[in-house]
Image (tube, coloured by chain):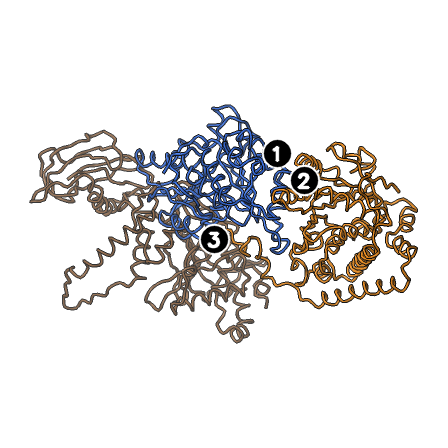
Amino acid sequence: MDVIMPQLGETVAEGVVTKWHKKVGDAVKADETLFDVETDKVSTEIPAPATGVIAEIIVQEGITAKVGARLAVIRESGAKAAPESREGGTRASAAPAVAKSKVAASAVPAAAPRGFLPAADPGQRLSPVVRRLVAEHQLNPAEIRGSGRDGRITREDVLSHIGRRGAGEARTPERPRHDVAGETRKPLNAVRKRTRDHMAHSWTTTPHVVQAVEADFSRVEQVRRSAGAAWKSREGFALTYLPFIAHAVASALGEFPLLNASLDGDDLVLHRRINLGIAVDLNFEGLMVPVVKDASGKPLPELARTINDLAQRARSSKLRPDDVTGGTYTISNNGAFGTLFTASIINPPQVAVLSTDAVRKKPVVLEGPEGDCVAIRPVGILAQSFDHRAVDGAYAAAFLRELKTIIESRDWQQALGA
Amino acid sequence: MDTKVKRGKVPPARDIGRETRLELYRLQLELRYCEKRAYDLFLQNLIKGTSHLSLGQEAIAAAFGVAMKPADWTFCTYRGHAHTLARGASMTGVLGELMGRQCGLLGGKGGSMHLTDVTKGAMGSYAIIGAHLPVAAGAAWSAQYRGTDQVAVCFFGDGTTNIGAFHEALNFAAVWKLPVVYVCENNLYMEYTPIGQVTAVEHPAADRASAYGLPSINVDGNDADEVYKVAVEAMDKARAGGGPSLIEAKTYRHSGHSRADPAKYRPEGELDRWLKRDPLALYRERLLGLGTVEATLKEMEAEAMRKVDEATATAKASPVPSVDDIEKNVWADGGAAWRN
Amino acid sequence: MAELTYRDAVAAGIAQEMERDENVVFLGEDVAAAGGVFKATVGLLEKFGPKRVRDCPISEQAIVGAAMGAAMTGLRPIAEIMFSDFFAVCWDIVANEIAKMRYMTNGQIQLPLVIRTANGAGSRFGAQHSQSVENWAMAVPGLKVVAPAFPADVKGLLAAAVRDPDPVLFFEQKSLYPMKGEVPDGECVDQLGKAKVLRQGSDCTIVALAAMVHRSLAAADMLEKEHGISATVIDVRSLVPLDTQTILGEVVKTGRLVTVEENPRLCGWGAEIASIVADECFWDLDGPIVRITTPHVPLPSADLLEDNTIPSVERIVREVREKID
């Protein structure tokens, strides 16, 4: 089998083979370190993709080779003939995954080699027919290989995928099930599978950075307490912190549009509309993220009603396809469980996600002209995970500061129209 | 006024029979009273948009109306209520159309400027100056081709004589020797401007006839008998294969160009002078002079008014058209579909 | 079957209808004695005589106005406007009168007439004698608009136009007059409002009209043989009435629409089809709609310039390759 230059980082196109640990004729075991590669940031050890004997070394030490180039050939032991180099891509993809753990062990910084070659980045544009087919068949675009221009997913790609998937599903029952005593096998439902794939993809392609601010919710609390009862009896649901936070987020995103965006190749696509995804837990059975469209145009009461309606419909499985598409920023509200802090995973193709956790009374220091004093205030942590490819820490932090300022100083009474 | 008429087989005044004369008067009365009613209905906001009134010009439409045969065709301008009525179109249909009702001649689809009744040979009123002149020539061509003795009569104003289509149509009709009679109602004003200020010749139509190899014909447009004589002669010539005629009939409109126009551009005294030559008044006097008794005239006047009143009531009671009619009758199949 | 040139098919179509119906008459400038400046009406005067085939003065308003008056009063006239650019000279009669008279009179007026004209570029005649103006006509309610690409279609669609009870503007492509094609023997009557799928493909649907049909077919061949792109080609033939069902049906199969239009860019006939497809086929589109048109300029006269202005086979191939994957 071919040994090829692995994918070493999002922006890395080539590397220098600095050292071969084996020579032609040597035996090698799978996962044993085979060679070292250096890119402009870091040197990495690459393990052998298979067990066998080094048949040929194509690229000598000191030579630069492009990602995917053939570097050496291993004549594998066993009856298996050497597969065509075309499959080398998939095989070699196993290597960097292992390399990742080795690299982690040797504490190499951020340019650790990525996992598999992503089949399709959902950040790219999906044509109307592709979107429709994806929705109709409940597919994950991340799973679909794009054969179109610039790797885009074409209609044919989706149709082929559906065809293969159908075949794949037919084979499933043949997989061996090991029912060891004490274990229960719980098949993943559709939502879980989608979440699995979506989260794995996000995690492996997006460099996450998490920042947090602590916000004083006194003003919000005041309005909640004074208007809460009347609201509940009139609207039929309680007025939580979430609509206030969403209202503030929509305003703050107006000032920080780079966070209301998506990466598309070499462009950061700024979305004109602010469509807030609100993560809703479905009774521990899964996570849905219905979207409040044009959140920035909605007054607070309407925002509260919309969020409530979406959450209800999410829990009763009455969401429409339109309700779950088009999100540009996501809010994940974990506060109900009393957590202090959550570092959420970004919902691609978005570039940031805000986590809100419990608001509880805490002692805070208030600075005054006569000196400092301690007061008891309702305080909550707002943590934003952002995509470091799209924006930097200073910008993201400034957004959080703006968000905190709005929460702490907006006239919430007026906003509620109470 | 000028009454230069080409000599030929012209029936002298005394040869227009009594019956014809009464018919001429009756028709002028109906045209006047109906048009006056349209004026009033506009003030009552029952007629919308605009209306171009021919008050004062009735003699011309009436004279041709009596002279024409049922199979002949009329083409007139947007100032065409009288010409359409003169072919026998119903007053209810005319007033109904002006008021935008179902009973209107056009079902409310065309309005004041497009009155048409093909069953009476009234082949349309046309709102673009000059457009209908070549169309009239085409109808005349159809008669010539099929060998019938039908004649197309085409009415237009003094302003039309300066537009391109006038010249194209006259030349075309003359070259093909088509049975079409072109009648220019010179009411002295091209919309708001005195025609003399914008025309290179004194008689906007008659002085151009020679450019098409046609004789110059001027007639007093306020004398129904004179117009009638000229009409008969021109149509006989056309029927006999003698080709087109171009007639200029001098007249005057009592109101403005359209309902919106108070006609303040008219010099002092002009309207009064012309009101003294009101064609109806002139004709009434003539009839009395020729022996018709007052009672007969009064009866005719009452009858005309009664017809107008009846038509007005019927039209007022007619419902407005359905919005379903909007997408009807673009095509011969009655529909408006441009795609499958 | 006989092989006829496009121009001979015009005369054949007129002759067929004049033979069938004595109310069909024909008028225009230099159409009778001279057989037409493009020699598209040779032999008609000899066959049908000066009463039915008539030469007119240079008076476009009078010509189409007379056609209108004749159609209103029992005849079925075919009028010629020598170059389609000259429609501008008599556009009042066409757009304000002929197109509207039936509607305004609520169906009283009948207008079974045909106005045929020589349309389009490629003959180095310059900007005022080379335009494609079928899109002007498409924009006026009350006019039917036809533009054949093949001699057989010329004859068949002209016959259909003459038999149609409504006004039909018949756009002949002047650069196609010498083109030869098979025309069936005997009576030839086609149908307005029917497009034709000339070639089936899988990667994109090319919709074209008149001269652009031939270029699209040549381009589709090249795309298939040299670039592995498989294109469907549709000849629209009739802009009003429009065969949207055929067009939509084919676009759904490939997911991509390409129009090839000789008219200048703005408000070309393809813009309307693009709009209909974007509306009714949106969820079947696998990529943006591509319009290949003449740029929005008056046409230059020098041969090299003219050939590089109207869409060429090379340009069609290039644009499809660039935009269809």
Q: Quadrant of residue B249?
A: top right
State whether discs 2 and 1 lie on one chain: no
Of circles 2 and 3, the one toward us is 2
Q: Residue at x 11, y 33 (%)?
A: A24
Does A44 sit left or right of A305 as displayed?
left
- Residue A397 visible within the image: no
- At label 2, the amino acid type is Leu
Q: Quadrant of residue B266?
A: top right
Q: What shade does chain A have?
A: brown
Q: What shade does chain B have?
A: orange
Q: Residue at x 37, y 34 (%)?
A: C218
Tell me, by letter, which chain the rendering colours blue: C
Tell me the subunit letter for badge 2: B
**Element on which disc 2 rests:** loop
- Residue A139 visible within the image: yes
State whether discs 2 and 3 lie on one chain: no
Pointer 1 residue: C56
The image position of residue B20, as x and y in percent, is 81, 55
- At label 1, the amino acid type is Cys
Q: Which mark is residue A400?
A: 3
**Element on which disc 1 rests:** loop
The image position of residue B10, as x and y in percent, is 81, 44
Tell me the subunit letter for badge 1: C
CA gap between label 2 and label 1 equals 13 Å
